[in-house]
Image (spheres, grey):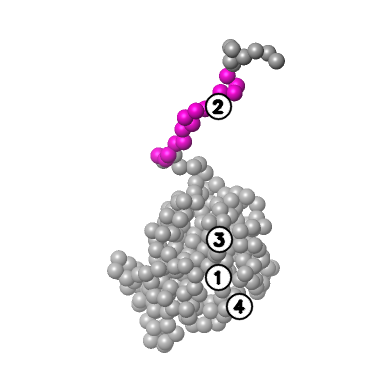
Amino acid sequence: MHLDVQDLRNFYYRSALGRAAQKTVRAEMMRIWPEAKGQTVVGYGFAVPFLRPYLGDARRVVALMPAPQGVIGWPSDCPNVSVLCEETWWPLETGHVDKLLVMHGLETSEQPAALLEECWRVLGPGGSVLFVVPNRAGLWSRSDKTPFGFGRPYSQGQLESQLKSHEFMPVNHAMTLYQPPSERRFWRKTAGMWESLGGKLSMVAAGGVLLVEATKRVQASSGLGLREKVRKPLEVLRPNPEAKPV
């Protein structure tokens, strides 16, 4: 179930908690993807708050928003790059995307397998996809006051397993949003402290958001599997010396 685009916009742009979440997640994303000069960058779901750093240097930036969610024009100060699309049928060429950000897209999808197949299709050789999802063990997935409290939260193992089953290779992972999902002034003033402490104590403290970067496998894995044997193969094409012409 997708959230309404107006609710997402209001959270990220009109609430103190949303702006704090935007700042924190975007900082972690920029650590993983510091630049995109000359590249094609695509965001799916509601990724627009996190795509702005790439508008200046990227060759092309596209913000795909699924039809059940709705679309808004973005950015407000530049030509629009937002596109309304079907969840599993994107208006993009195959294999031309260098960086793909999936934000509020996978956990709310009713067809996650088909969505991952579409991600695989559009990603180009050497490209990477970054999935940002609610952490099952974090506080943010337990509060319906933020967008991270909707849909299916993931553990790192669950997400990486799902990606591997769809021919992606996880190459990097991170955790962020250690601050409590609260609008109270005390928590807002101490948000930076919680993020700093959480990063140092990540083994015992769970962040609210998981980020997993993956690349595209171009060949199927060659692991061991069951091989089907034909016990009585058809011999229609084998010459039969006893056969008589009709």
* Residue plotted at (65% across, 13% down): 244
* Quadrant the N terminus occupies: bottom right
In space, the residues marked 4 and 2 are separated at their CA atoms by 62 Å
* Residue plotted at (40% across, 68% down): 136
| Residue 230 highlighted magenta (yes or no) | yes
Evaluate if marks 3 and 2 touch, with contact meaning CB atoms under 8 Å apart.
Answer: no
Evaluate if marks 4 and 3 touch, with contact meaning CB atoms under 8 Å apart.
Answer: no
Mark 1 and mark 2 lie on one chain; the one further toward the N terminus is: 1
Residue labelled with disc 2: 234
One can see residue 58 in this view: no
Of residues 184 and 138, the one nearer the viewer is 138
Under mark 3, the amino acid is Gln
- Please provide percent x and percent y for residue 190: 37, 81
One can see residue 72 in this view: yes
Residue labelled with disc 4: 6
Evaluate if marks 4 and 2 touch, with contact meaning CB atoms under 8 Å apart.
Answer: no
Under mark 4, the amino acid is Gln
Tell me which corner region of the image, top left, top right, bottom left or bottom right, holds residue 46: bottom right
In space, the residues marked 1 and 3 are separated at their CA atoms by 10 Å
The kind of secondary structure the magenta stretch mainly shows is loop
Mark 4 and mark 3 lie on one chain; the one further toward the N terminus is: 4
Under mark 1, the amino acid is Met
Residue labelled with disc 3: 111
Position of residue 38 relative to residue 85, above or below, is above
Mark 1 and mark 3 lie on one chain; the one further toward the N terminus is: 1
In space, the residues marked 3 and 2 are separated at their CA atoms by 40 Å
Determine the secondary structure under disc 3: loop
Q: Please name which of the two marks, 3 or 2, marks the residue nearer to the observer.
A: 2
Of residues 82 and 45, the one nearer the viewer is 45
In space, the residues marked 4 and 3 are separated at their CA atoms by 23 Å
Q: Mark 1 Cα within 10 Å, few/some/many (few <14, many 20+)?
A: few
